[in-house]
Image (cartoon, rainbow, N blue to C red):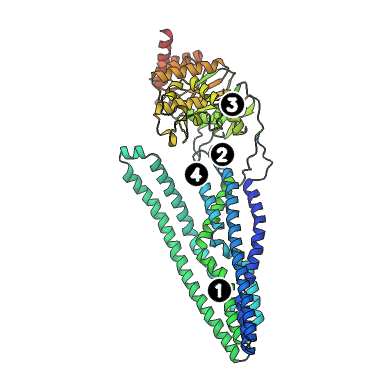
Amino acid sequence: MKTNQQPPALQVVMKEARRAVKPLIWFSAGINMLMLTGALYMLQVYHRVLGSHSTETLVVLTLMAATALATMAALEVVRQRLLAKVGTWMNARLAPVLLTASVEYAAAAPGQVTSRPLRDLDQVRNFFTSPSIYPILDAPWAPIFFAAIFLMHPWLGWLALCGGIVLFALALLNEYTTRKPLTEAGSAQSRAYTQAEAVIRNAEVVQSMGMLKPLLEIWKVHQDEANEGHSRASSRGGTISAIARSFRQALQIAILGLGAYLVLRNEASGGIMIAASILMGRALAPVEQAIGTWKATVGARDAYKRLVAVAGQHPEATPALPLPRPKGKFEAENIALARQGGGEPILKGISFQLNPGEVMALIGPSAAGKTSLARVLAGAWRPSAGRALLDGMDVAQWAAEDRGRHVGYLPQDIELFAGTVSENICRFATLNPAVFKHVVNAAQLAGVHELIKGLPKGYATEIGEAGAVLSGGQRQRIGLARALYGDPALLILDEPNSNLDKEGEDALAAAIGIAKATKTTIILIAHRPNIMEKVDKVLVLNRGQQDLFGPRDYVFNELANRAGKVAQMPKAAQLPTLEVVKEVKKIKEVKEA
């Protein structure tokens, strides 16, 4: 079982990252101290070399300056490599956590966008490894340079300090004027990405029905919004950056002019004039750089906020303690599922109980909530209220890696993964002879063993992205084998015969019969008669509410009794629809035959 006593993984990683930043601070301190080399060299040349005409002093000073600059270069290289290692380490630590958090976030809030956490992590990591972070590392040492200028002469110090304040004000103005357009551009860009991915994912439908042009127009609207926002931000930021550069040059001229004035008054030397100019340039560099890299800094900050929103409370994964295989007793206790964005709930107060080996059919009109309930019962979605219990254990609280060993789930939309047939069936467990034996057993139980043997490389056949090389019926039968893998105690099948031919339906019926005989509890969404013959109980849903539940014959008789009244009832009140009633009649005809 999972424990929630661990601190959030993001908090742990950032705490460890702060420890890794300490050496960066010391390296930055050394680099900034060595940045004084040029100014000190200039002072010493003016005061010692030019006054004494000593070549030996010039050589020694030059060698000392060269050594200092070589040391600074070495520290720069080490700092850059350390930043790269921090970024790589952060990605290795957080990427698995973020992917897990994204899955659980989507399960807890179906239909909500997860803010592209992996791309956000890349953005944060790239910020750490790019020059954009240097202003942050170098800014704390700017007071040293200002202090050195003050030591040379107070007037020079005040000029440099006032210039720094003006540049800092320009940086704040840059933040204020670009924040809103950058935020709007980011949101529009995210919508454009989502739209583009949807179009590519549904390329067959788009191409076959000529939907590309209108979808392209919708995408273009979002893309234009993003471009407009970026353009406005770039325009404003560029204007402020140009003003800052011009002001920076004016400051350089001003400090040289003031230094020359002080030299004329014999209050400073020519060396001080040049050194003050160099030091002021170094003191103001972080502020000036920050203005130029503000867009990247804001992007990384917003990406980190999104990471906190998705994974801020998610603990690092720990090995789950395995529980014994359940016997298969299943209970639903007043399950409810709210609709995202408000409105009528998807599910309201669903309760039933199944004993090991029982088969329950879940039926009802379209949009009754059948698939949503199946996802909740399988643990794919978290209910807003109530619990789904497998042998008394809440499936929503049961660690997925342990619960998954005992649950087989065949969704309505079959989603296979790039890899071999055997890897998909064994749920990408490490293949070995024992695992492969279970793979073959599951395939035989699903009646797909002969079909797989007919593939080019049998069980080793690569099926492509989303099983692209397989037909819909083949994907569904391999998905059934995946659900049956490992002798699950609970089997949930959502429209398992929607893509099957007669042979596939017979194999499905046989698989359900065998699983039932081994005391596997089965919940299936299906209406075809040959599958319904295996059913013990029936749950009828209508508009997310539980209409009928009980033994199959009782429910079907009740539905049949309603059949005579359906035509006279308002359409909104038909319980269930005429299609379900017709299916009940077909089932009875099959049984009588």
Residue at disc 1, secondary structure: helix
Q: Please say if the residues under marks 1 and 2 sit with CB atoms less than 8 Å apart.
A: no
Residue at disc 4, secondary structure: loop
Image point (62%, 89%), residue name: 53
Say the numbered circle drawn on residue 166.
1
Q: Earlier in the sequence, mark 1 or mark 2?
A: 2
- Where 477 sits versus 83, above or below? above
For mark 2, does the 10 Å Cα neighbourhood hold few (<14), some (14 to 19), or many (20 or more) residues? Answer: some
Does residue 306 appear left or right of residue 504 in this picture?
A: right
- Where 395 sits versus 188, above or below? above
Outermost residue on the front side: it is: 56
Q: CA distance from mark 4 to mark 3?
A: 30 Å
Q: Nearer the viewer, residue 232 or 476?
A: 476
Say the numbered circle drawn on residue 104.
2
Q: Earlier in the sequence, mark 3 or mark 1?
A: 1
Q: CA distance from mark 4 to mark 2?
A: 12 Å
Q: Earlier in the sequence, mark 2 or mark 3?
A: 2
Q: Please say if the residues under marks 4 and 2 sit with CB atoms less than 8 Å apart.
A: no
Locate residue 248, reporting x and y percent.
52, 75
Locate residue 558, reporting x and y percent.
48, 15
User: Of discs 2 and 3, which sits in the foreground?
Assistant: 3
- Amino acid of disc 1: Val
To which quarter of the image does residue 127 belong? Answer: bottom right
